[in-house]
Amino acid sequence: MSEFLVLQHIGCEDLGTIGPAMSRRGIGHRYVRLFDGEPVPKDLERYSGFIILGGPMNVYEEDKYPYLKDEDSLIKRGIERSIPILGICLGGQLIAKACHAKVRKGTQKEIGWYELNLTSDGGQDPAFKGFSEKLTVFQWHGDTFDIPEGAAHIASSALFRNQAYRIGEKVYGLQFHLEVTEEMIRQWMSEYQDELSSLDYTDPDRIIKDTTKNINRLNHHAELFYDNFFSR
C-alpha cells in the first residue's frame, strides 16, 4: 500500500475530505504533527507522495517556527524526486518559497467564501478536469505568493490573482481550501475567533450561511480533484 507523508501545522487543520478520499483509493498517510514537536523527516524515500497542510503561521516566521526551514529542505527534495506533492494554503506558500517565488502579505485577508476563476491553463489542467470555470471556494488567508518560474498559473480570485499553480506534472500549490467540511469551518471559526472579530469586513453569520449553501458543491469538486491528483 502506498503512503503519503502529511505535515500538519495545527490540530484543527487536518486532511479533512482528503483523508477518506485517500483511504478509498488504498492510499495510507502518516501525519507529522509539527505543533506537537514532531520533527520533519530528513527524506521521503519511504513515501509515494507528500501533502503540506495549512496553518496560522507565515512562511517568513522561521525564527519563531524553526521547522519551517526543515520543511523548505524537504519540499526541495520532494520536487527533485518528482513525487506527487500537494500544498494547501500555507503549504502552497511553502512550495512557492522553496521554488524561490516571493510570499508576502496581501492587501487584506480573504476569509469566507469567494469566487474562484480558472485561467486558460487551469481549464486544461489534468487535476482540474471537470471543474467549472467559476467555483465558490472557502478561503482563510492573508498572505499570497508569486507563481514560481515555469509553473502553470491555474486559478485566481478578485482579491488574490494567484490562487493555484502546478510545477512539472505532479506538484500543486493551492491557496484555497478544497478539503474543508462544515464541521472544520465551524471549528476554525471558534479557534480563530479573535482574528475574525478583529476584521470589520468579515461576517461570521454570513460565513455559516454561505457554508450551508456552498459546501456540497465544493465537496463535489474536491472529489474530482482527488480523482485526478491521486491517479497521477
Image: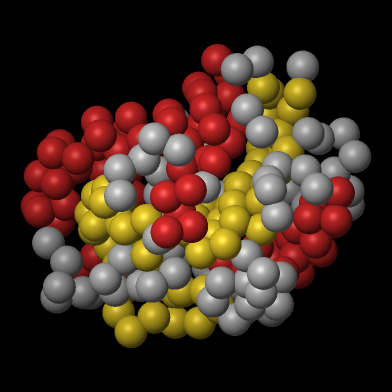
Q: Is residue 222 above or below residue 149?
A: above
Which quadrant of the view contains residue 103?
Answer: bottom right
Question: In the rendered view, how is the structure colored?
Answer: secondary structure
In the image, 62 versus 44, the foreground residue is: 44
Give how far across and how far down residue 171 sits, in percent: 66, 51
Viewer-proximal residue among 68 and 48:
48
Number of marks in the rendered image: 0
User: Going 44% across and 69% down the picture, which residue do you hit?
Assistant: 162
Say above or below: 170 vs 97. Answer: above
Figure quadrant of residue 30: top right
The one of 191 and 133 positioned closer to us in this rendering: 133
> Which residue is painted at 67% across and 22% down in the image?
27
Residue 105 in picture, x, y percent from top left? 44, 82
Q: Quadrant of the N terminus?
A: top right
Q: Is residue 205 left or right of residue 214?
A: left
Q: Quadrant of the C terminus?
A: top right
Decide if residue 60 is on the left or right side of residue 40. left
Judge whether residue 3 can be spotted in this image.
yes
The residue at the point 45 percent across, 38 percent down is: 129
Left or right of residue 134, residue 36 in this image? right
Residue 94 in sight from this viewpoint: no
User: Which residue is painted at 85% across and 56% down in the image?
Assistant: 80
Position of residue 46 measured from the top left corner of the image (x, y, whole percent): 87, 34
State the image coordinates of residue 35 (x, y, percent, origin top left).
Answer: 61, 53
Quarter location, residue 95: bottom right
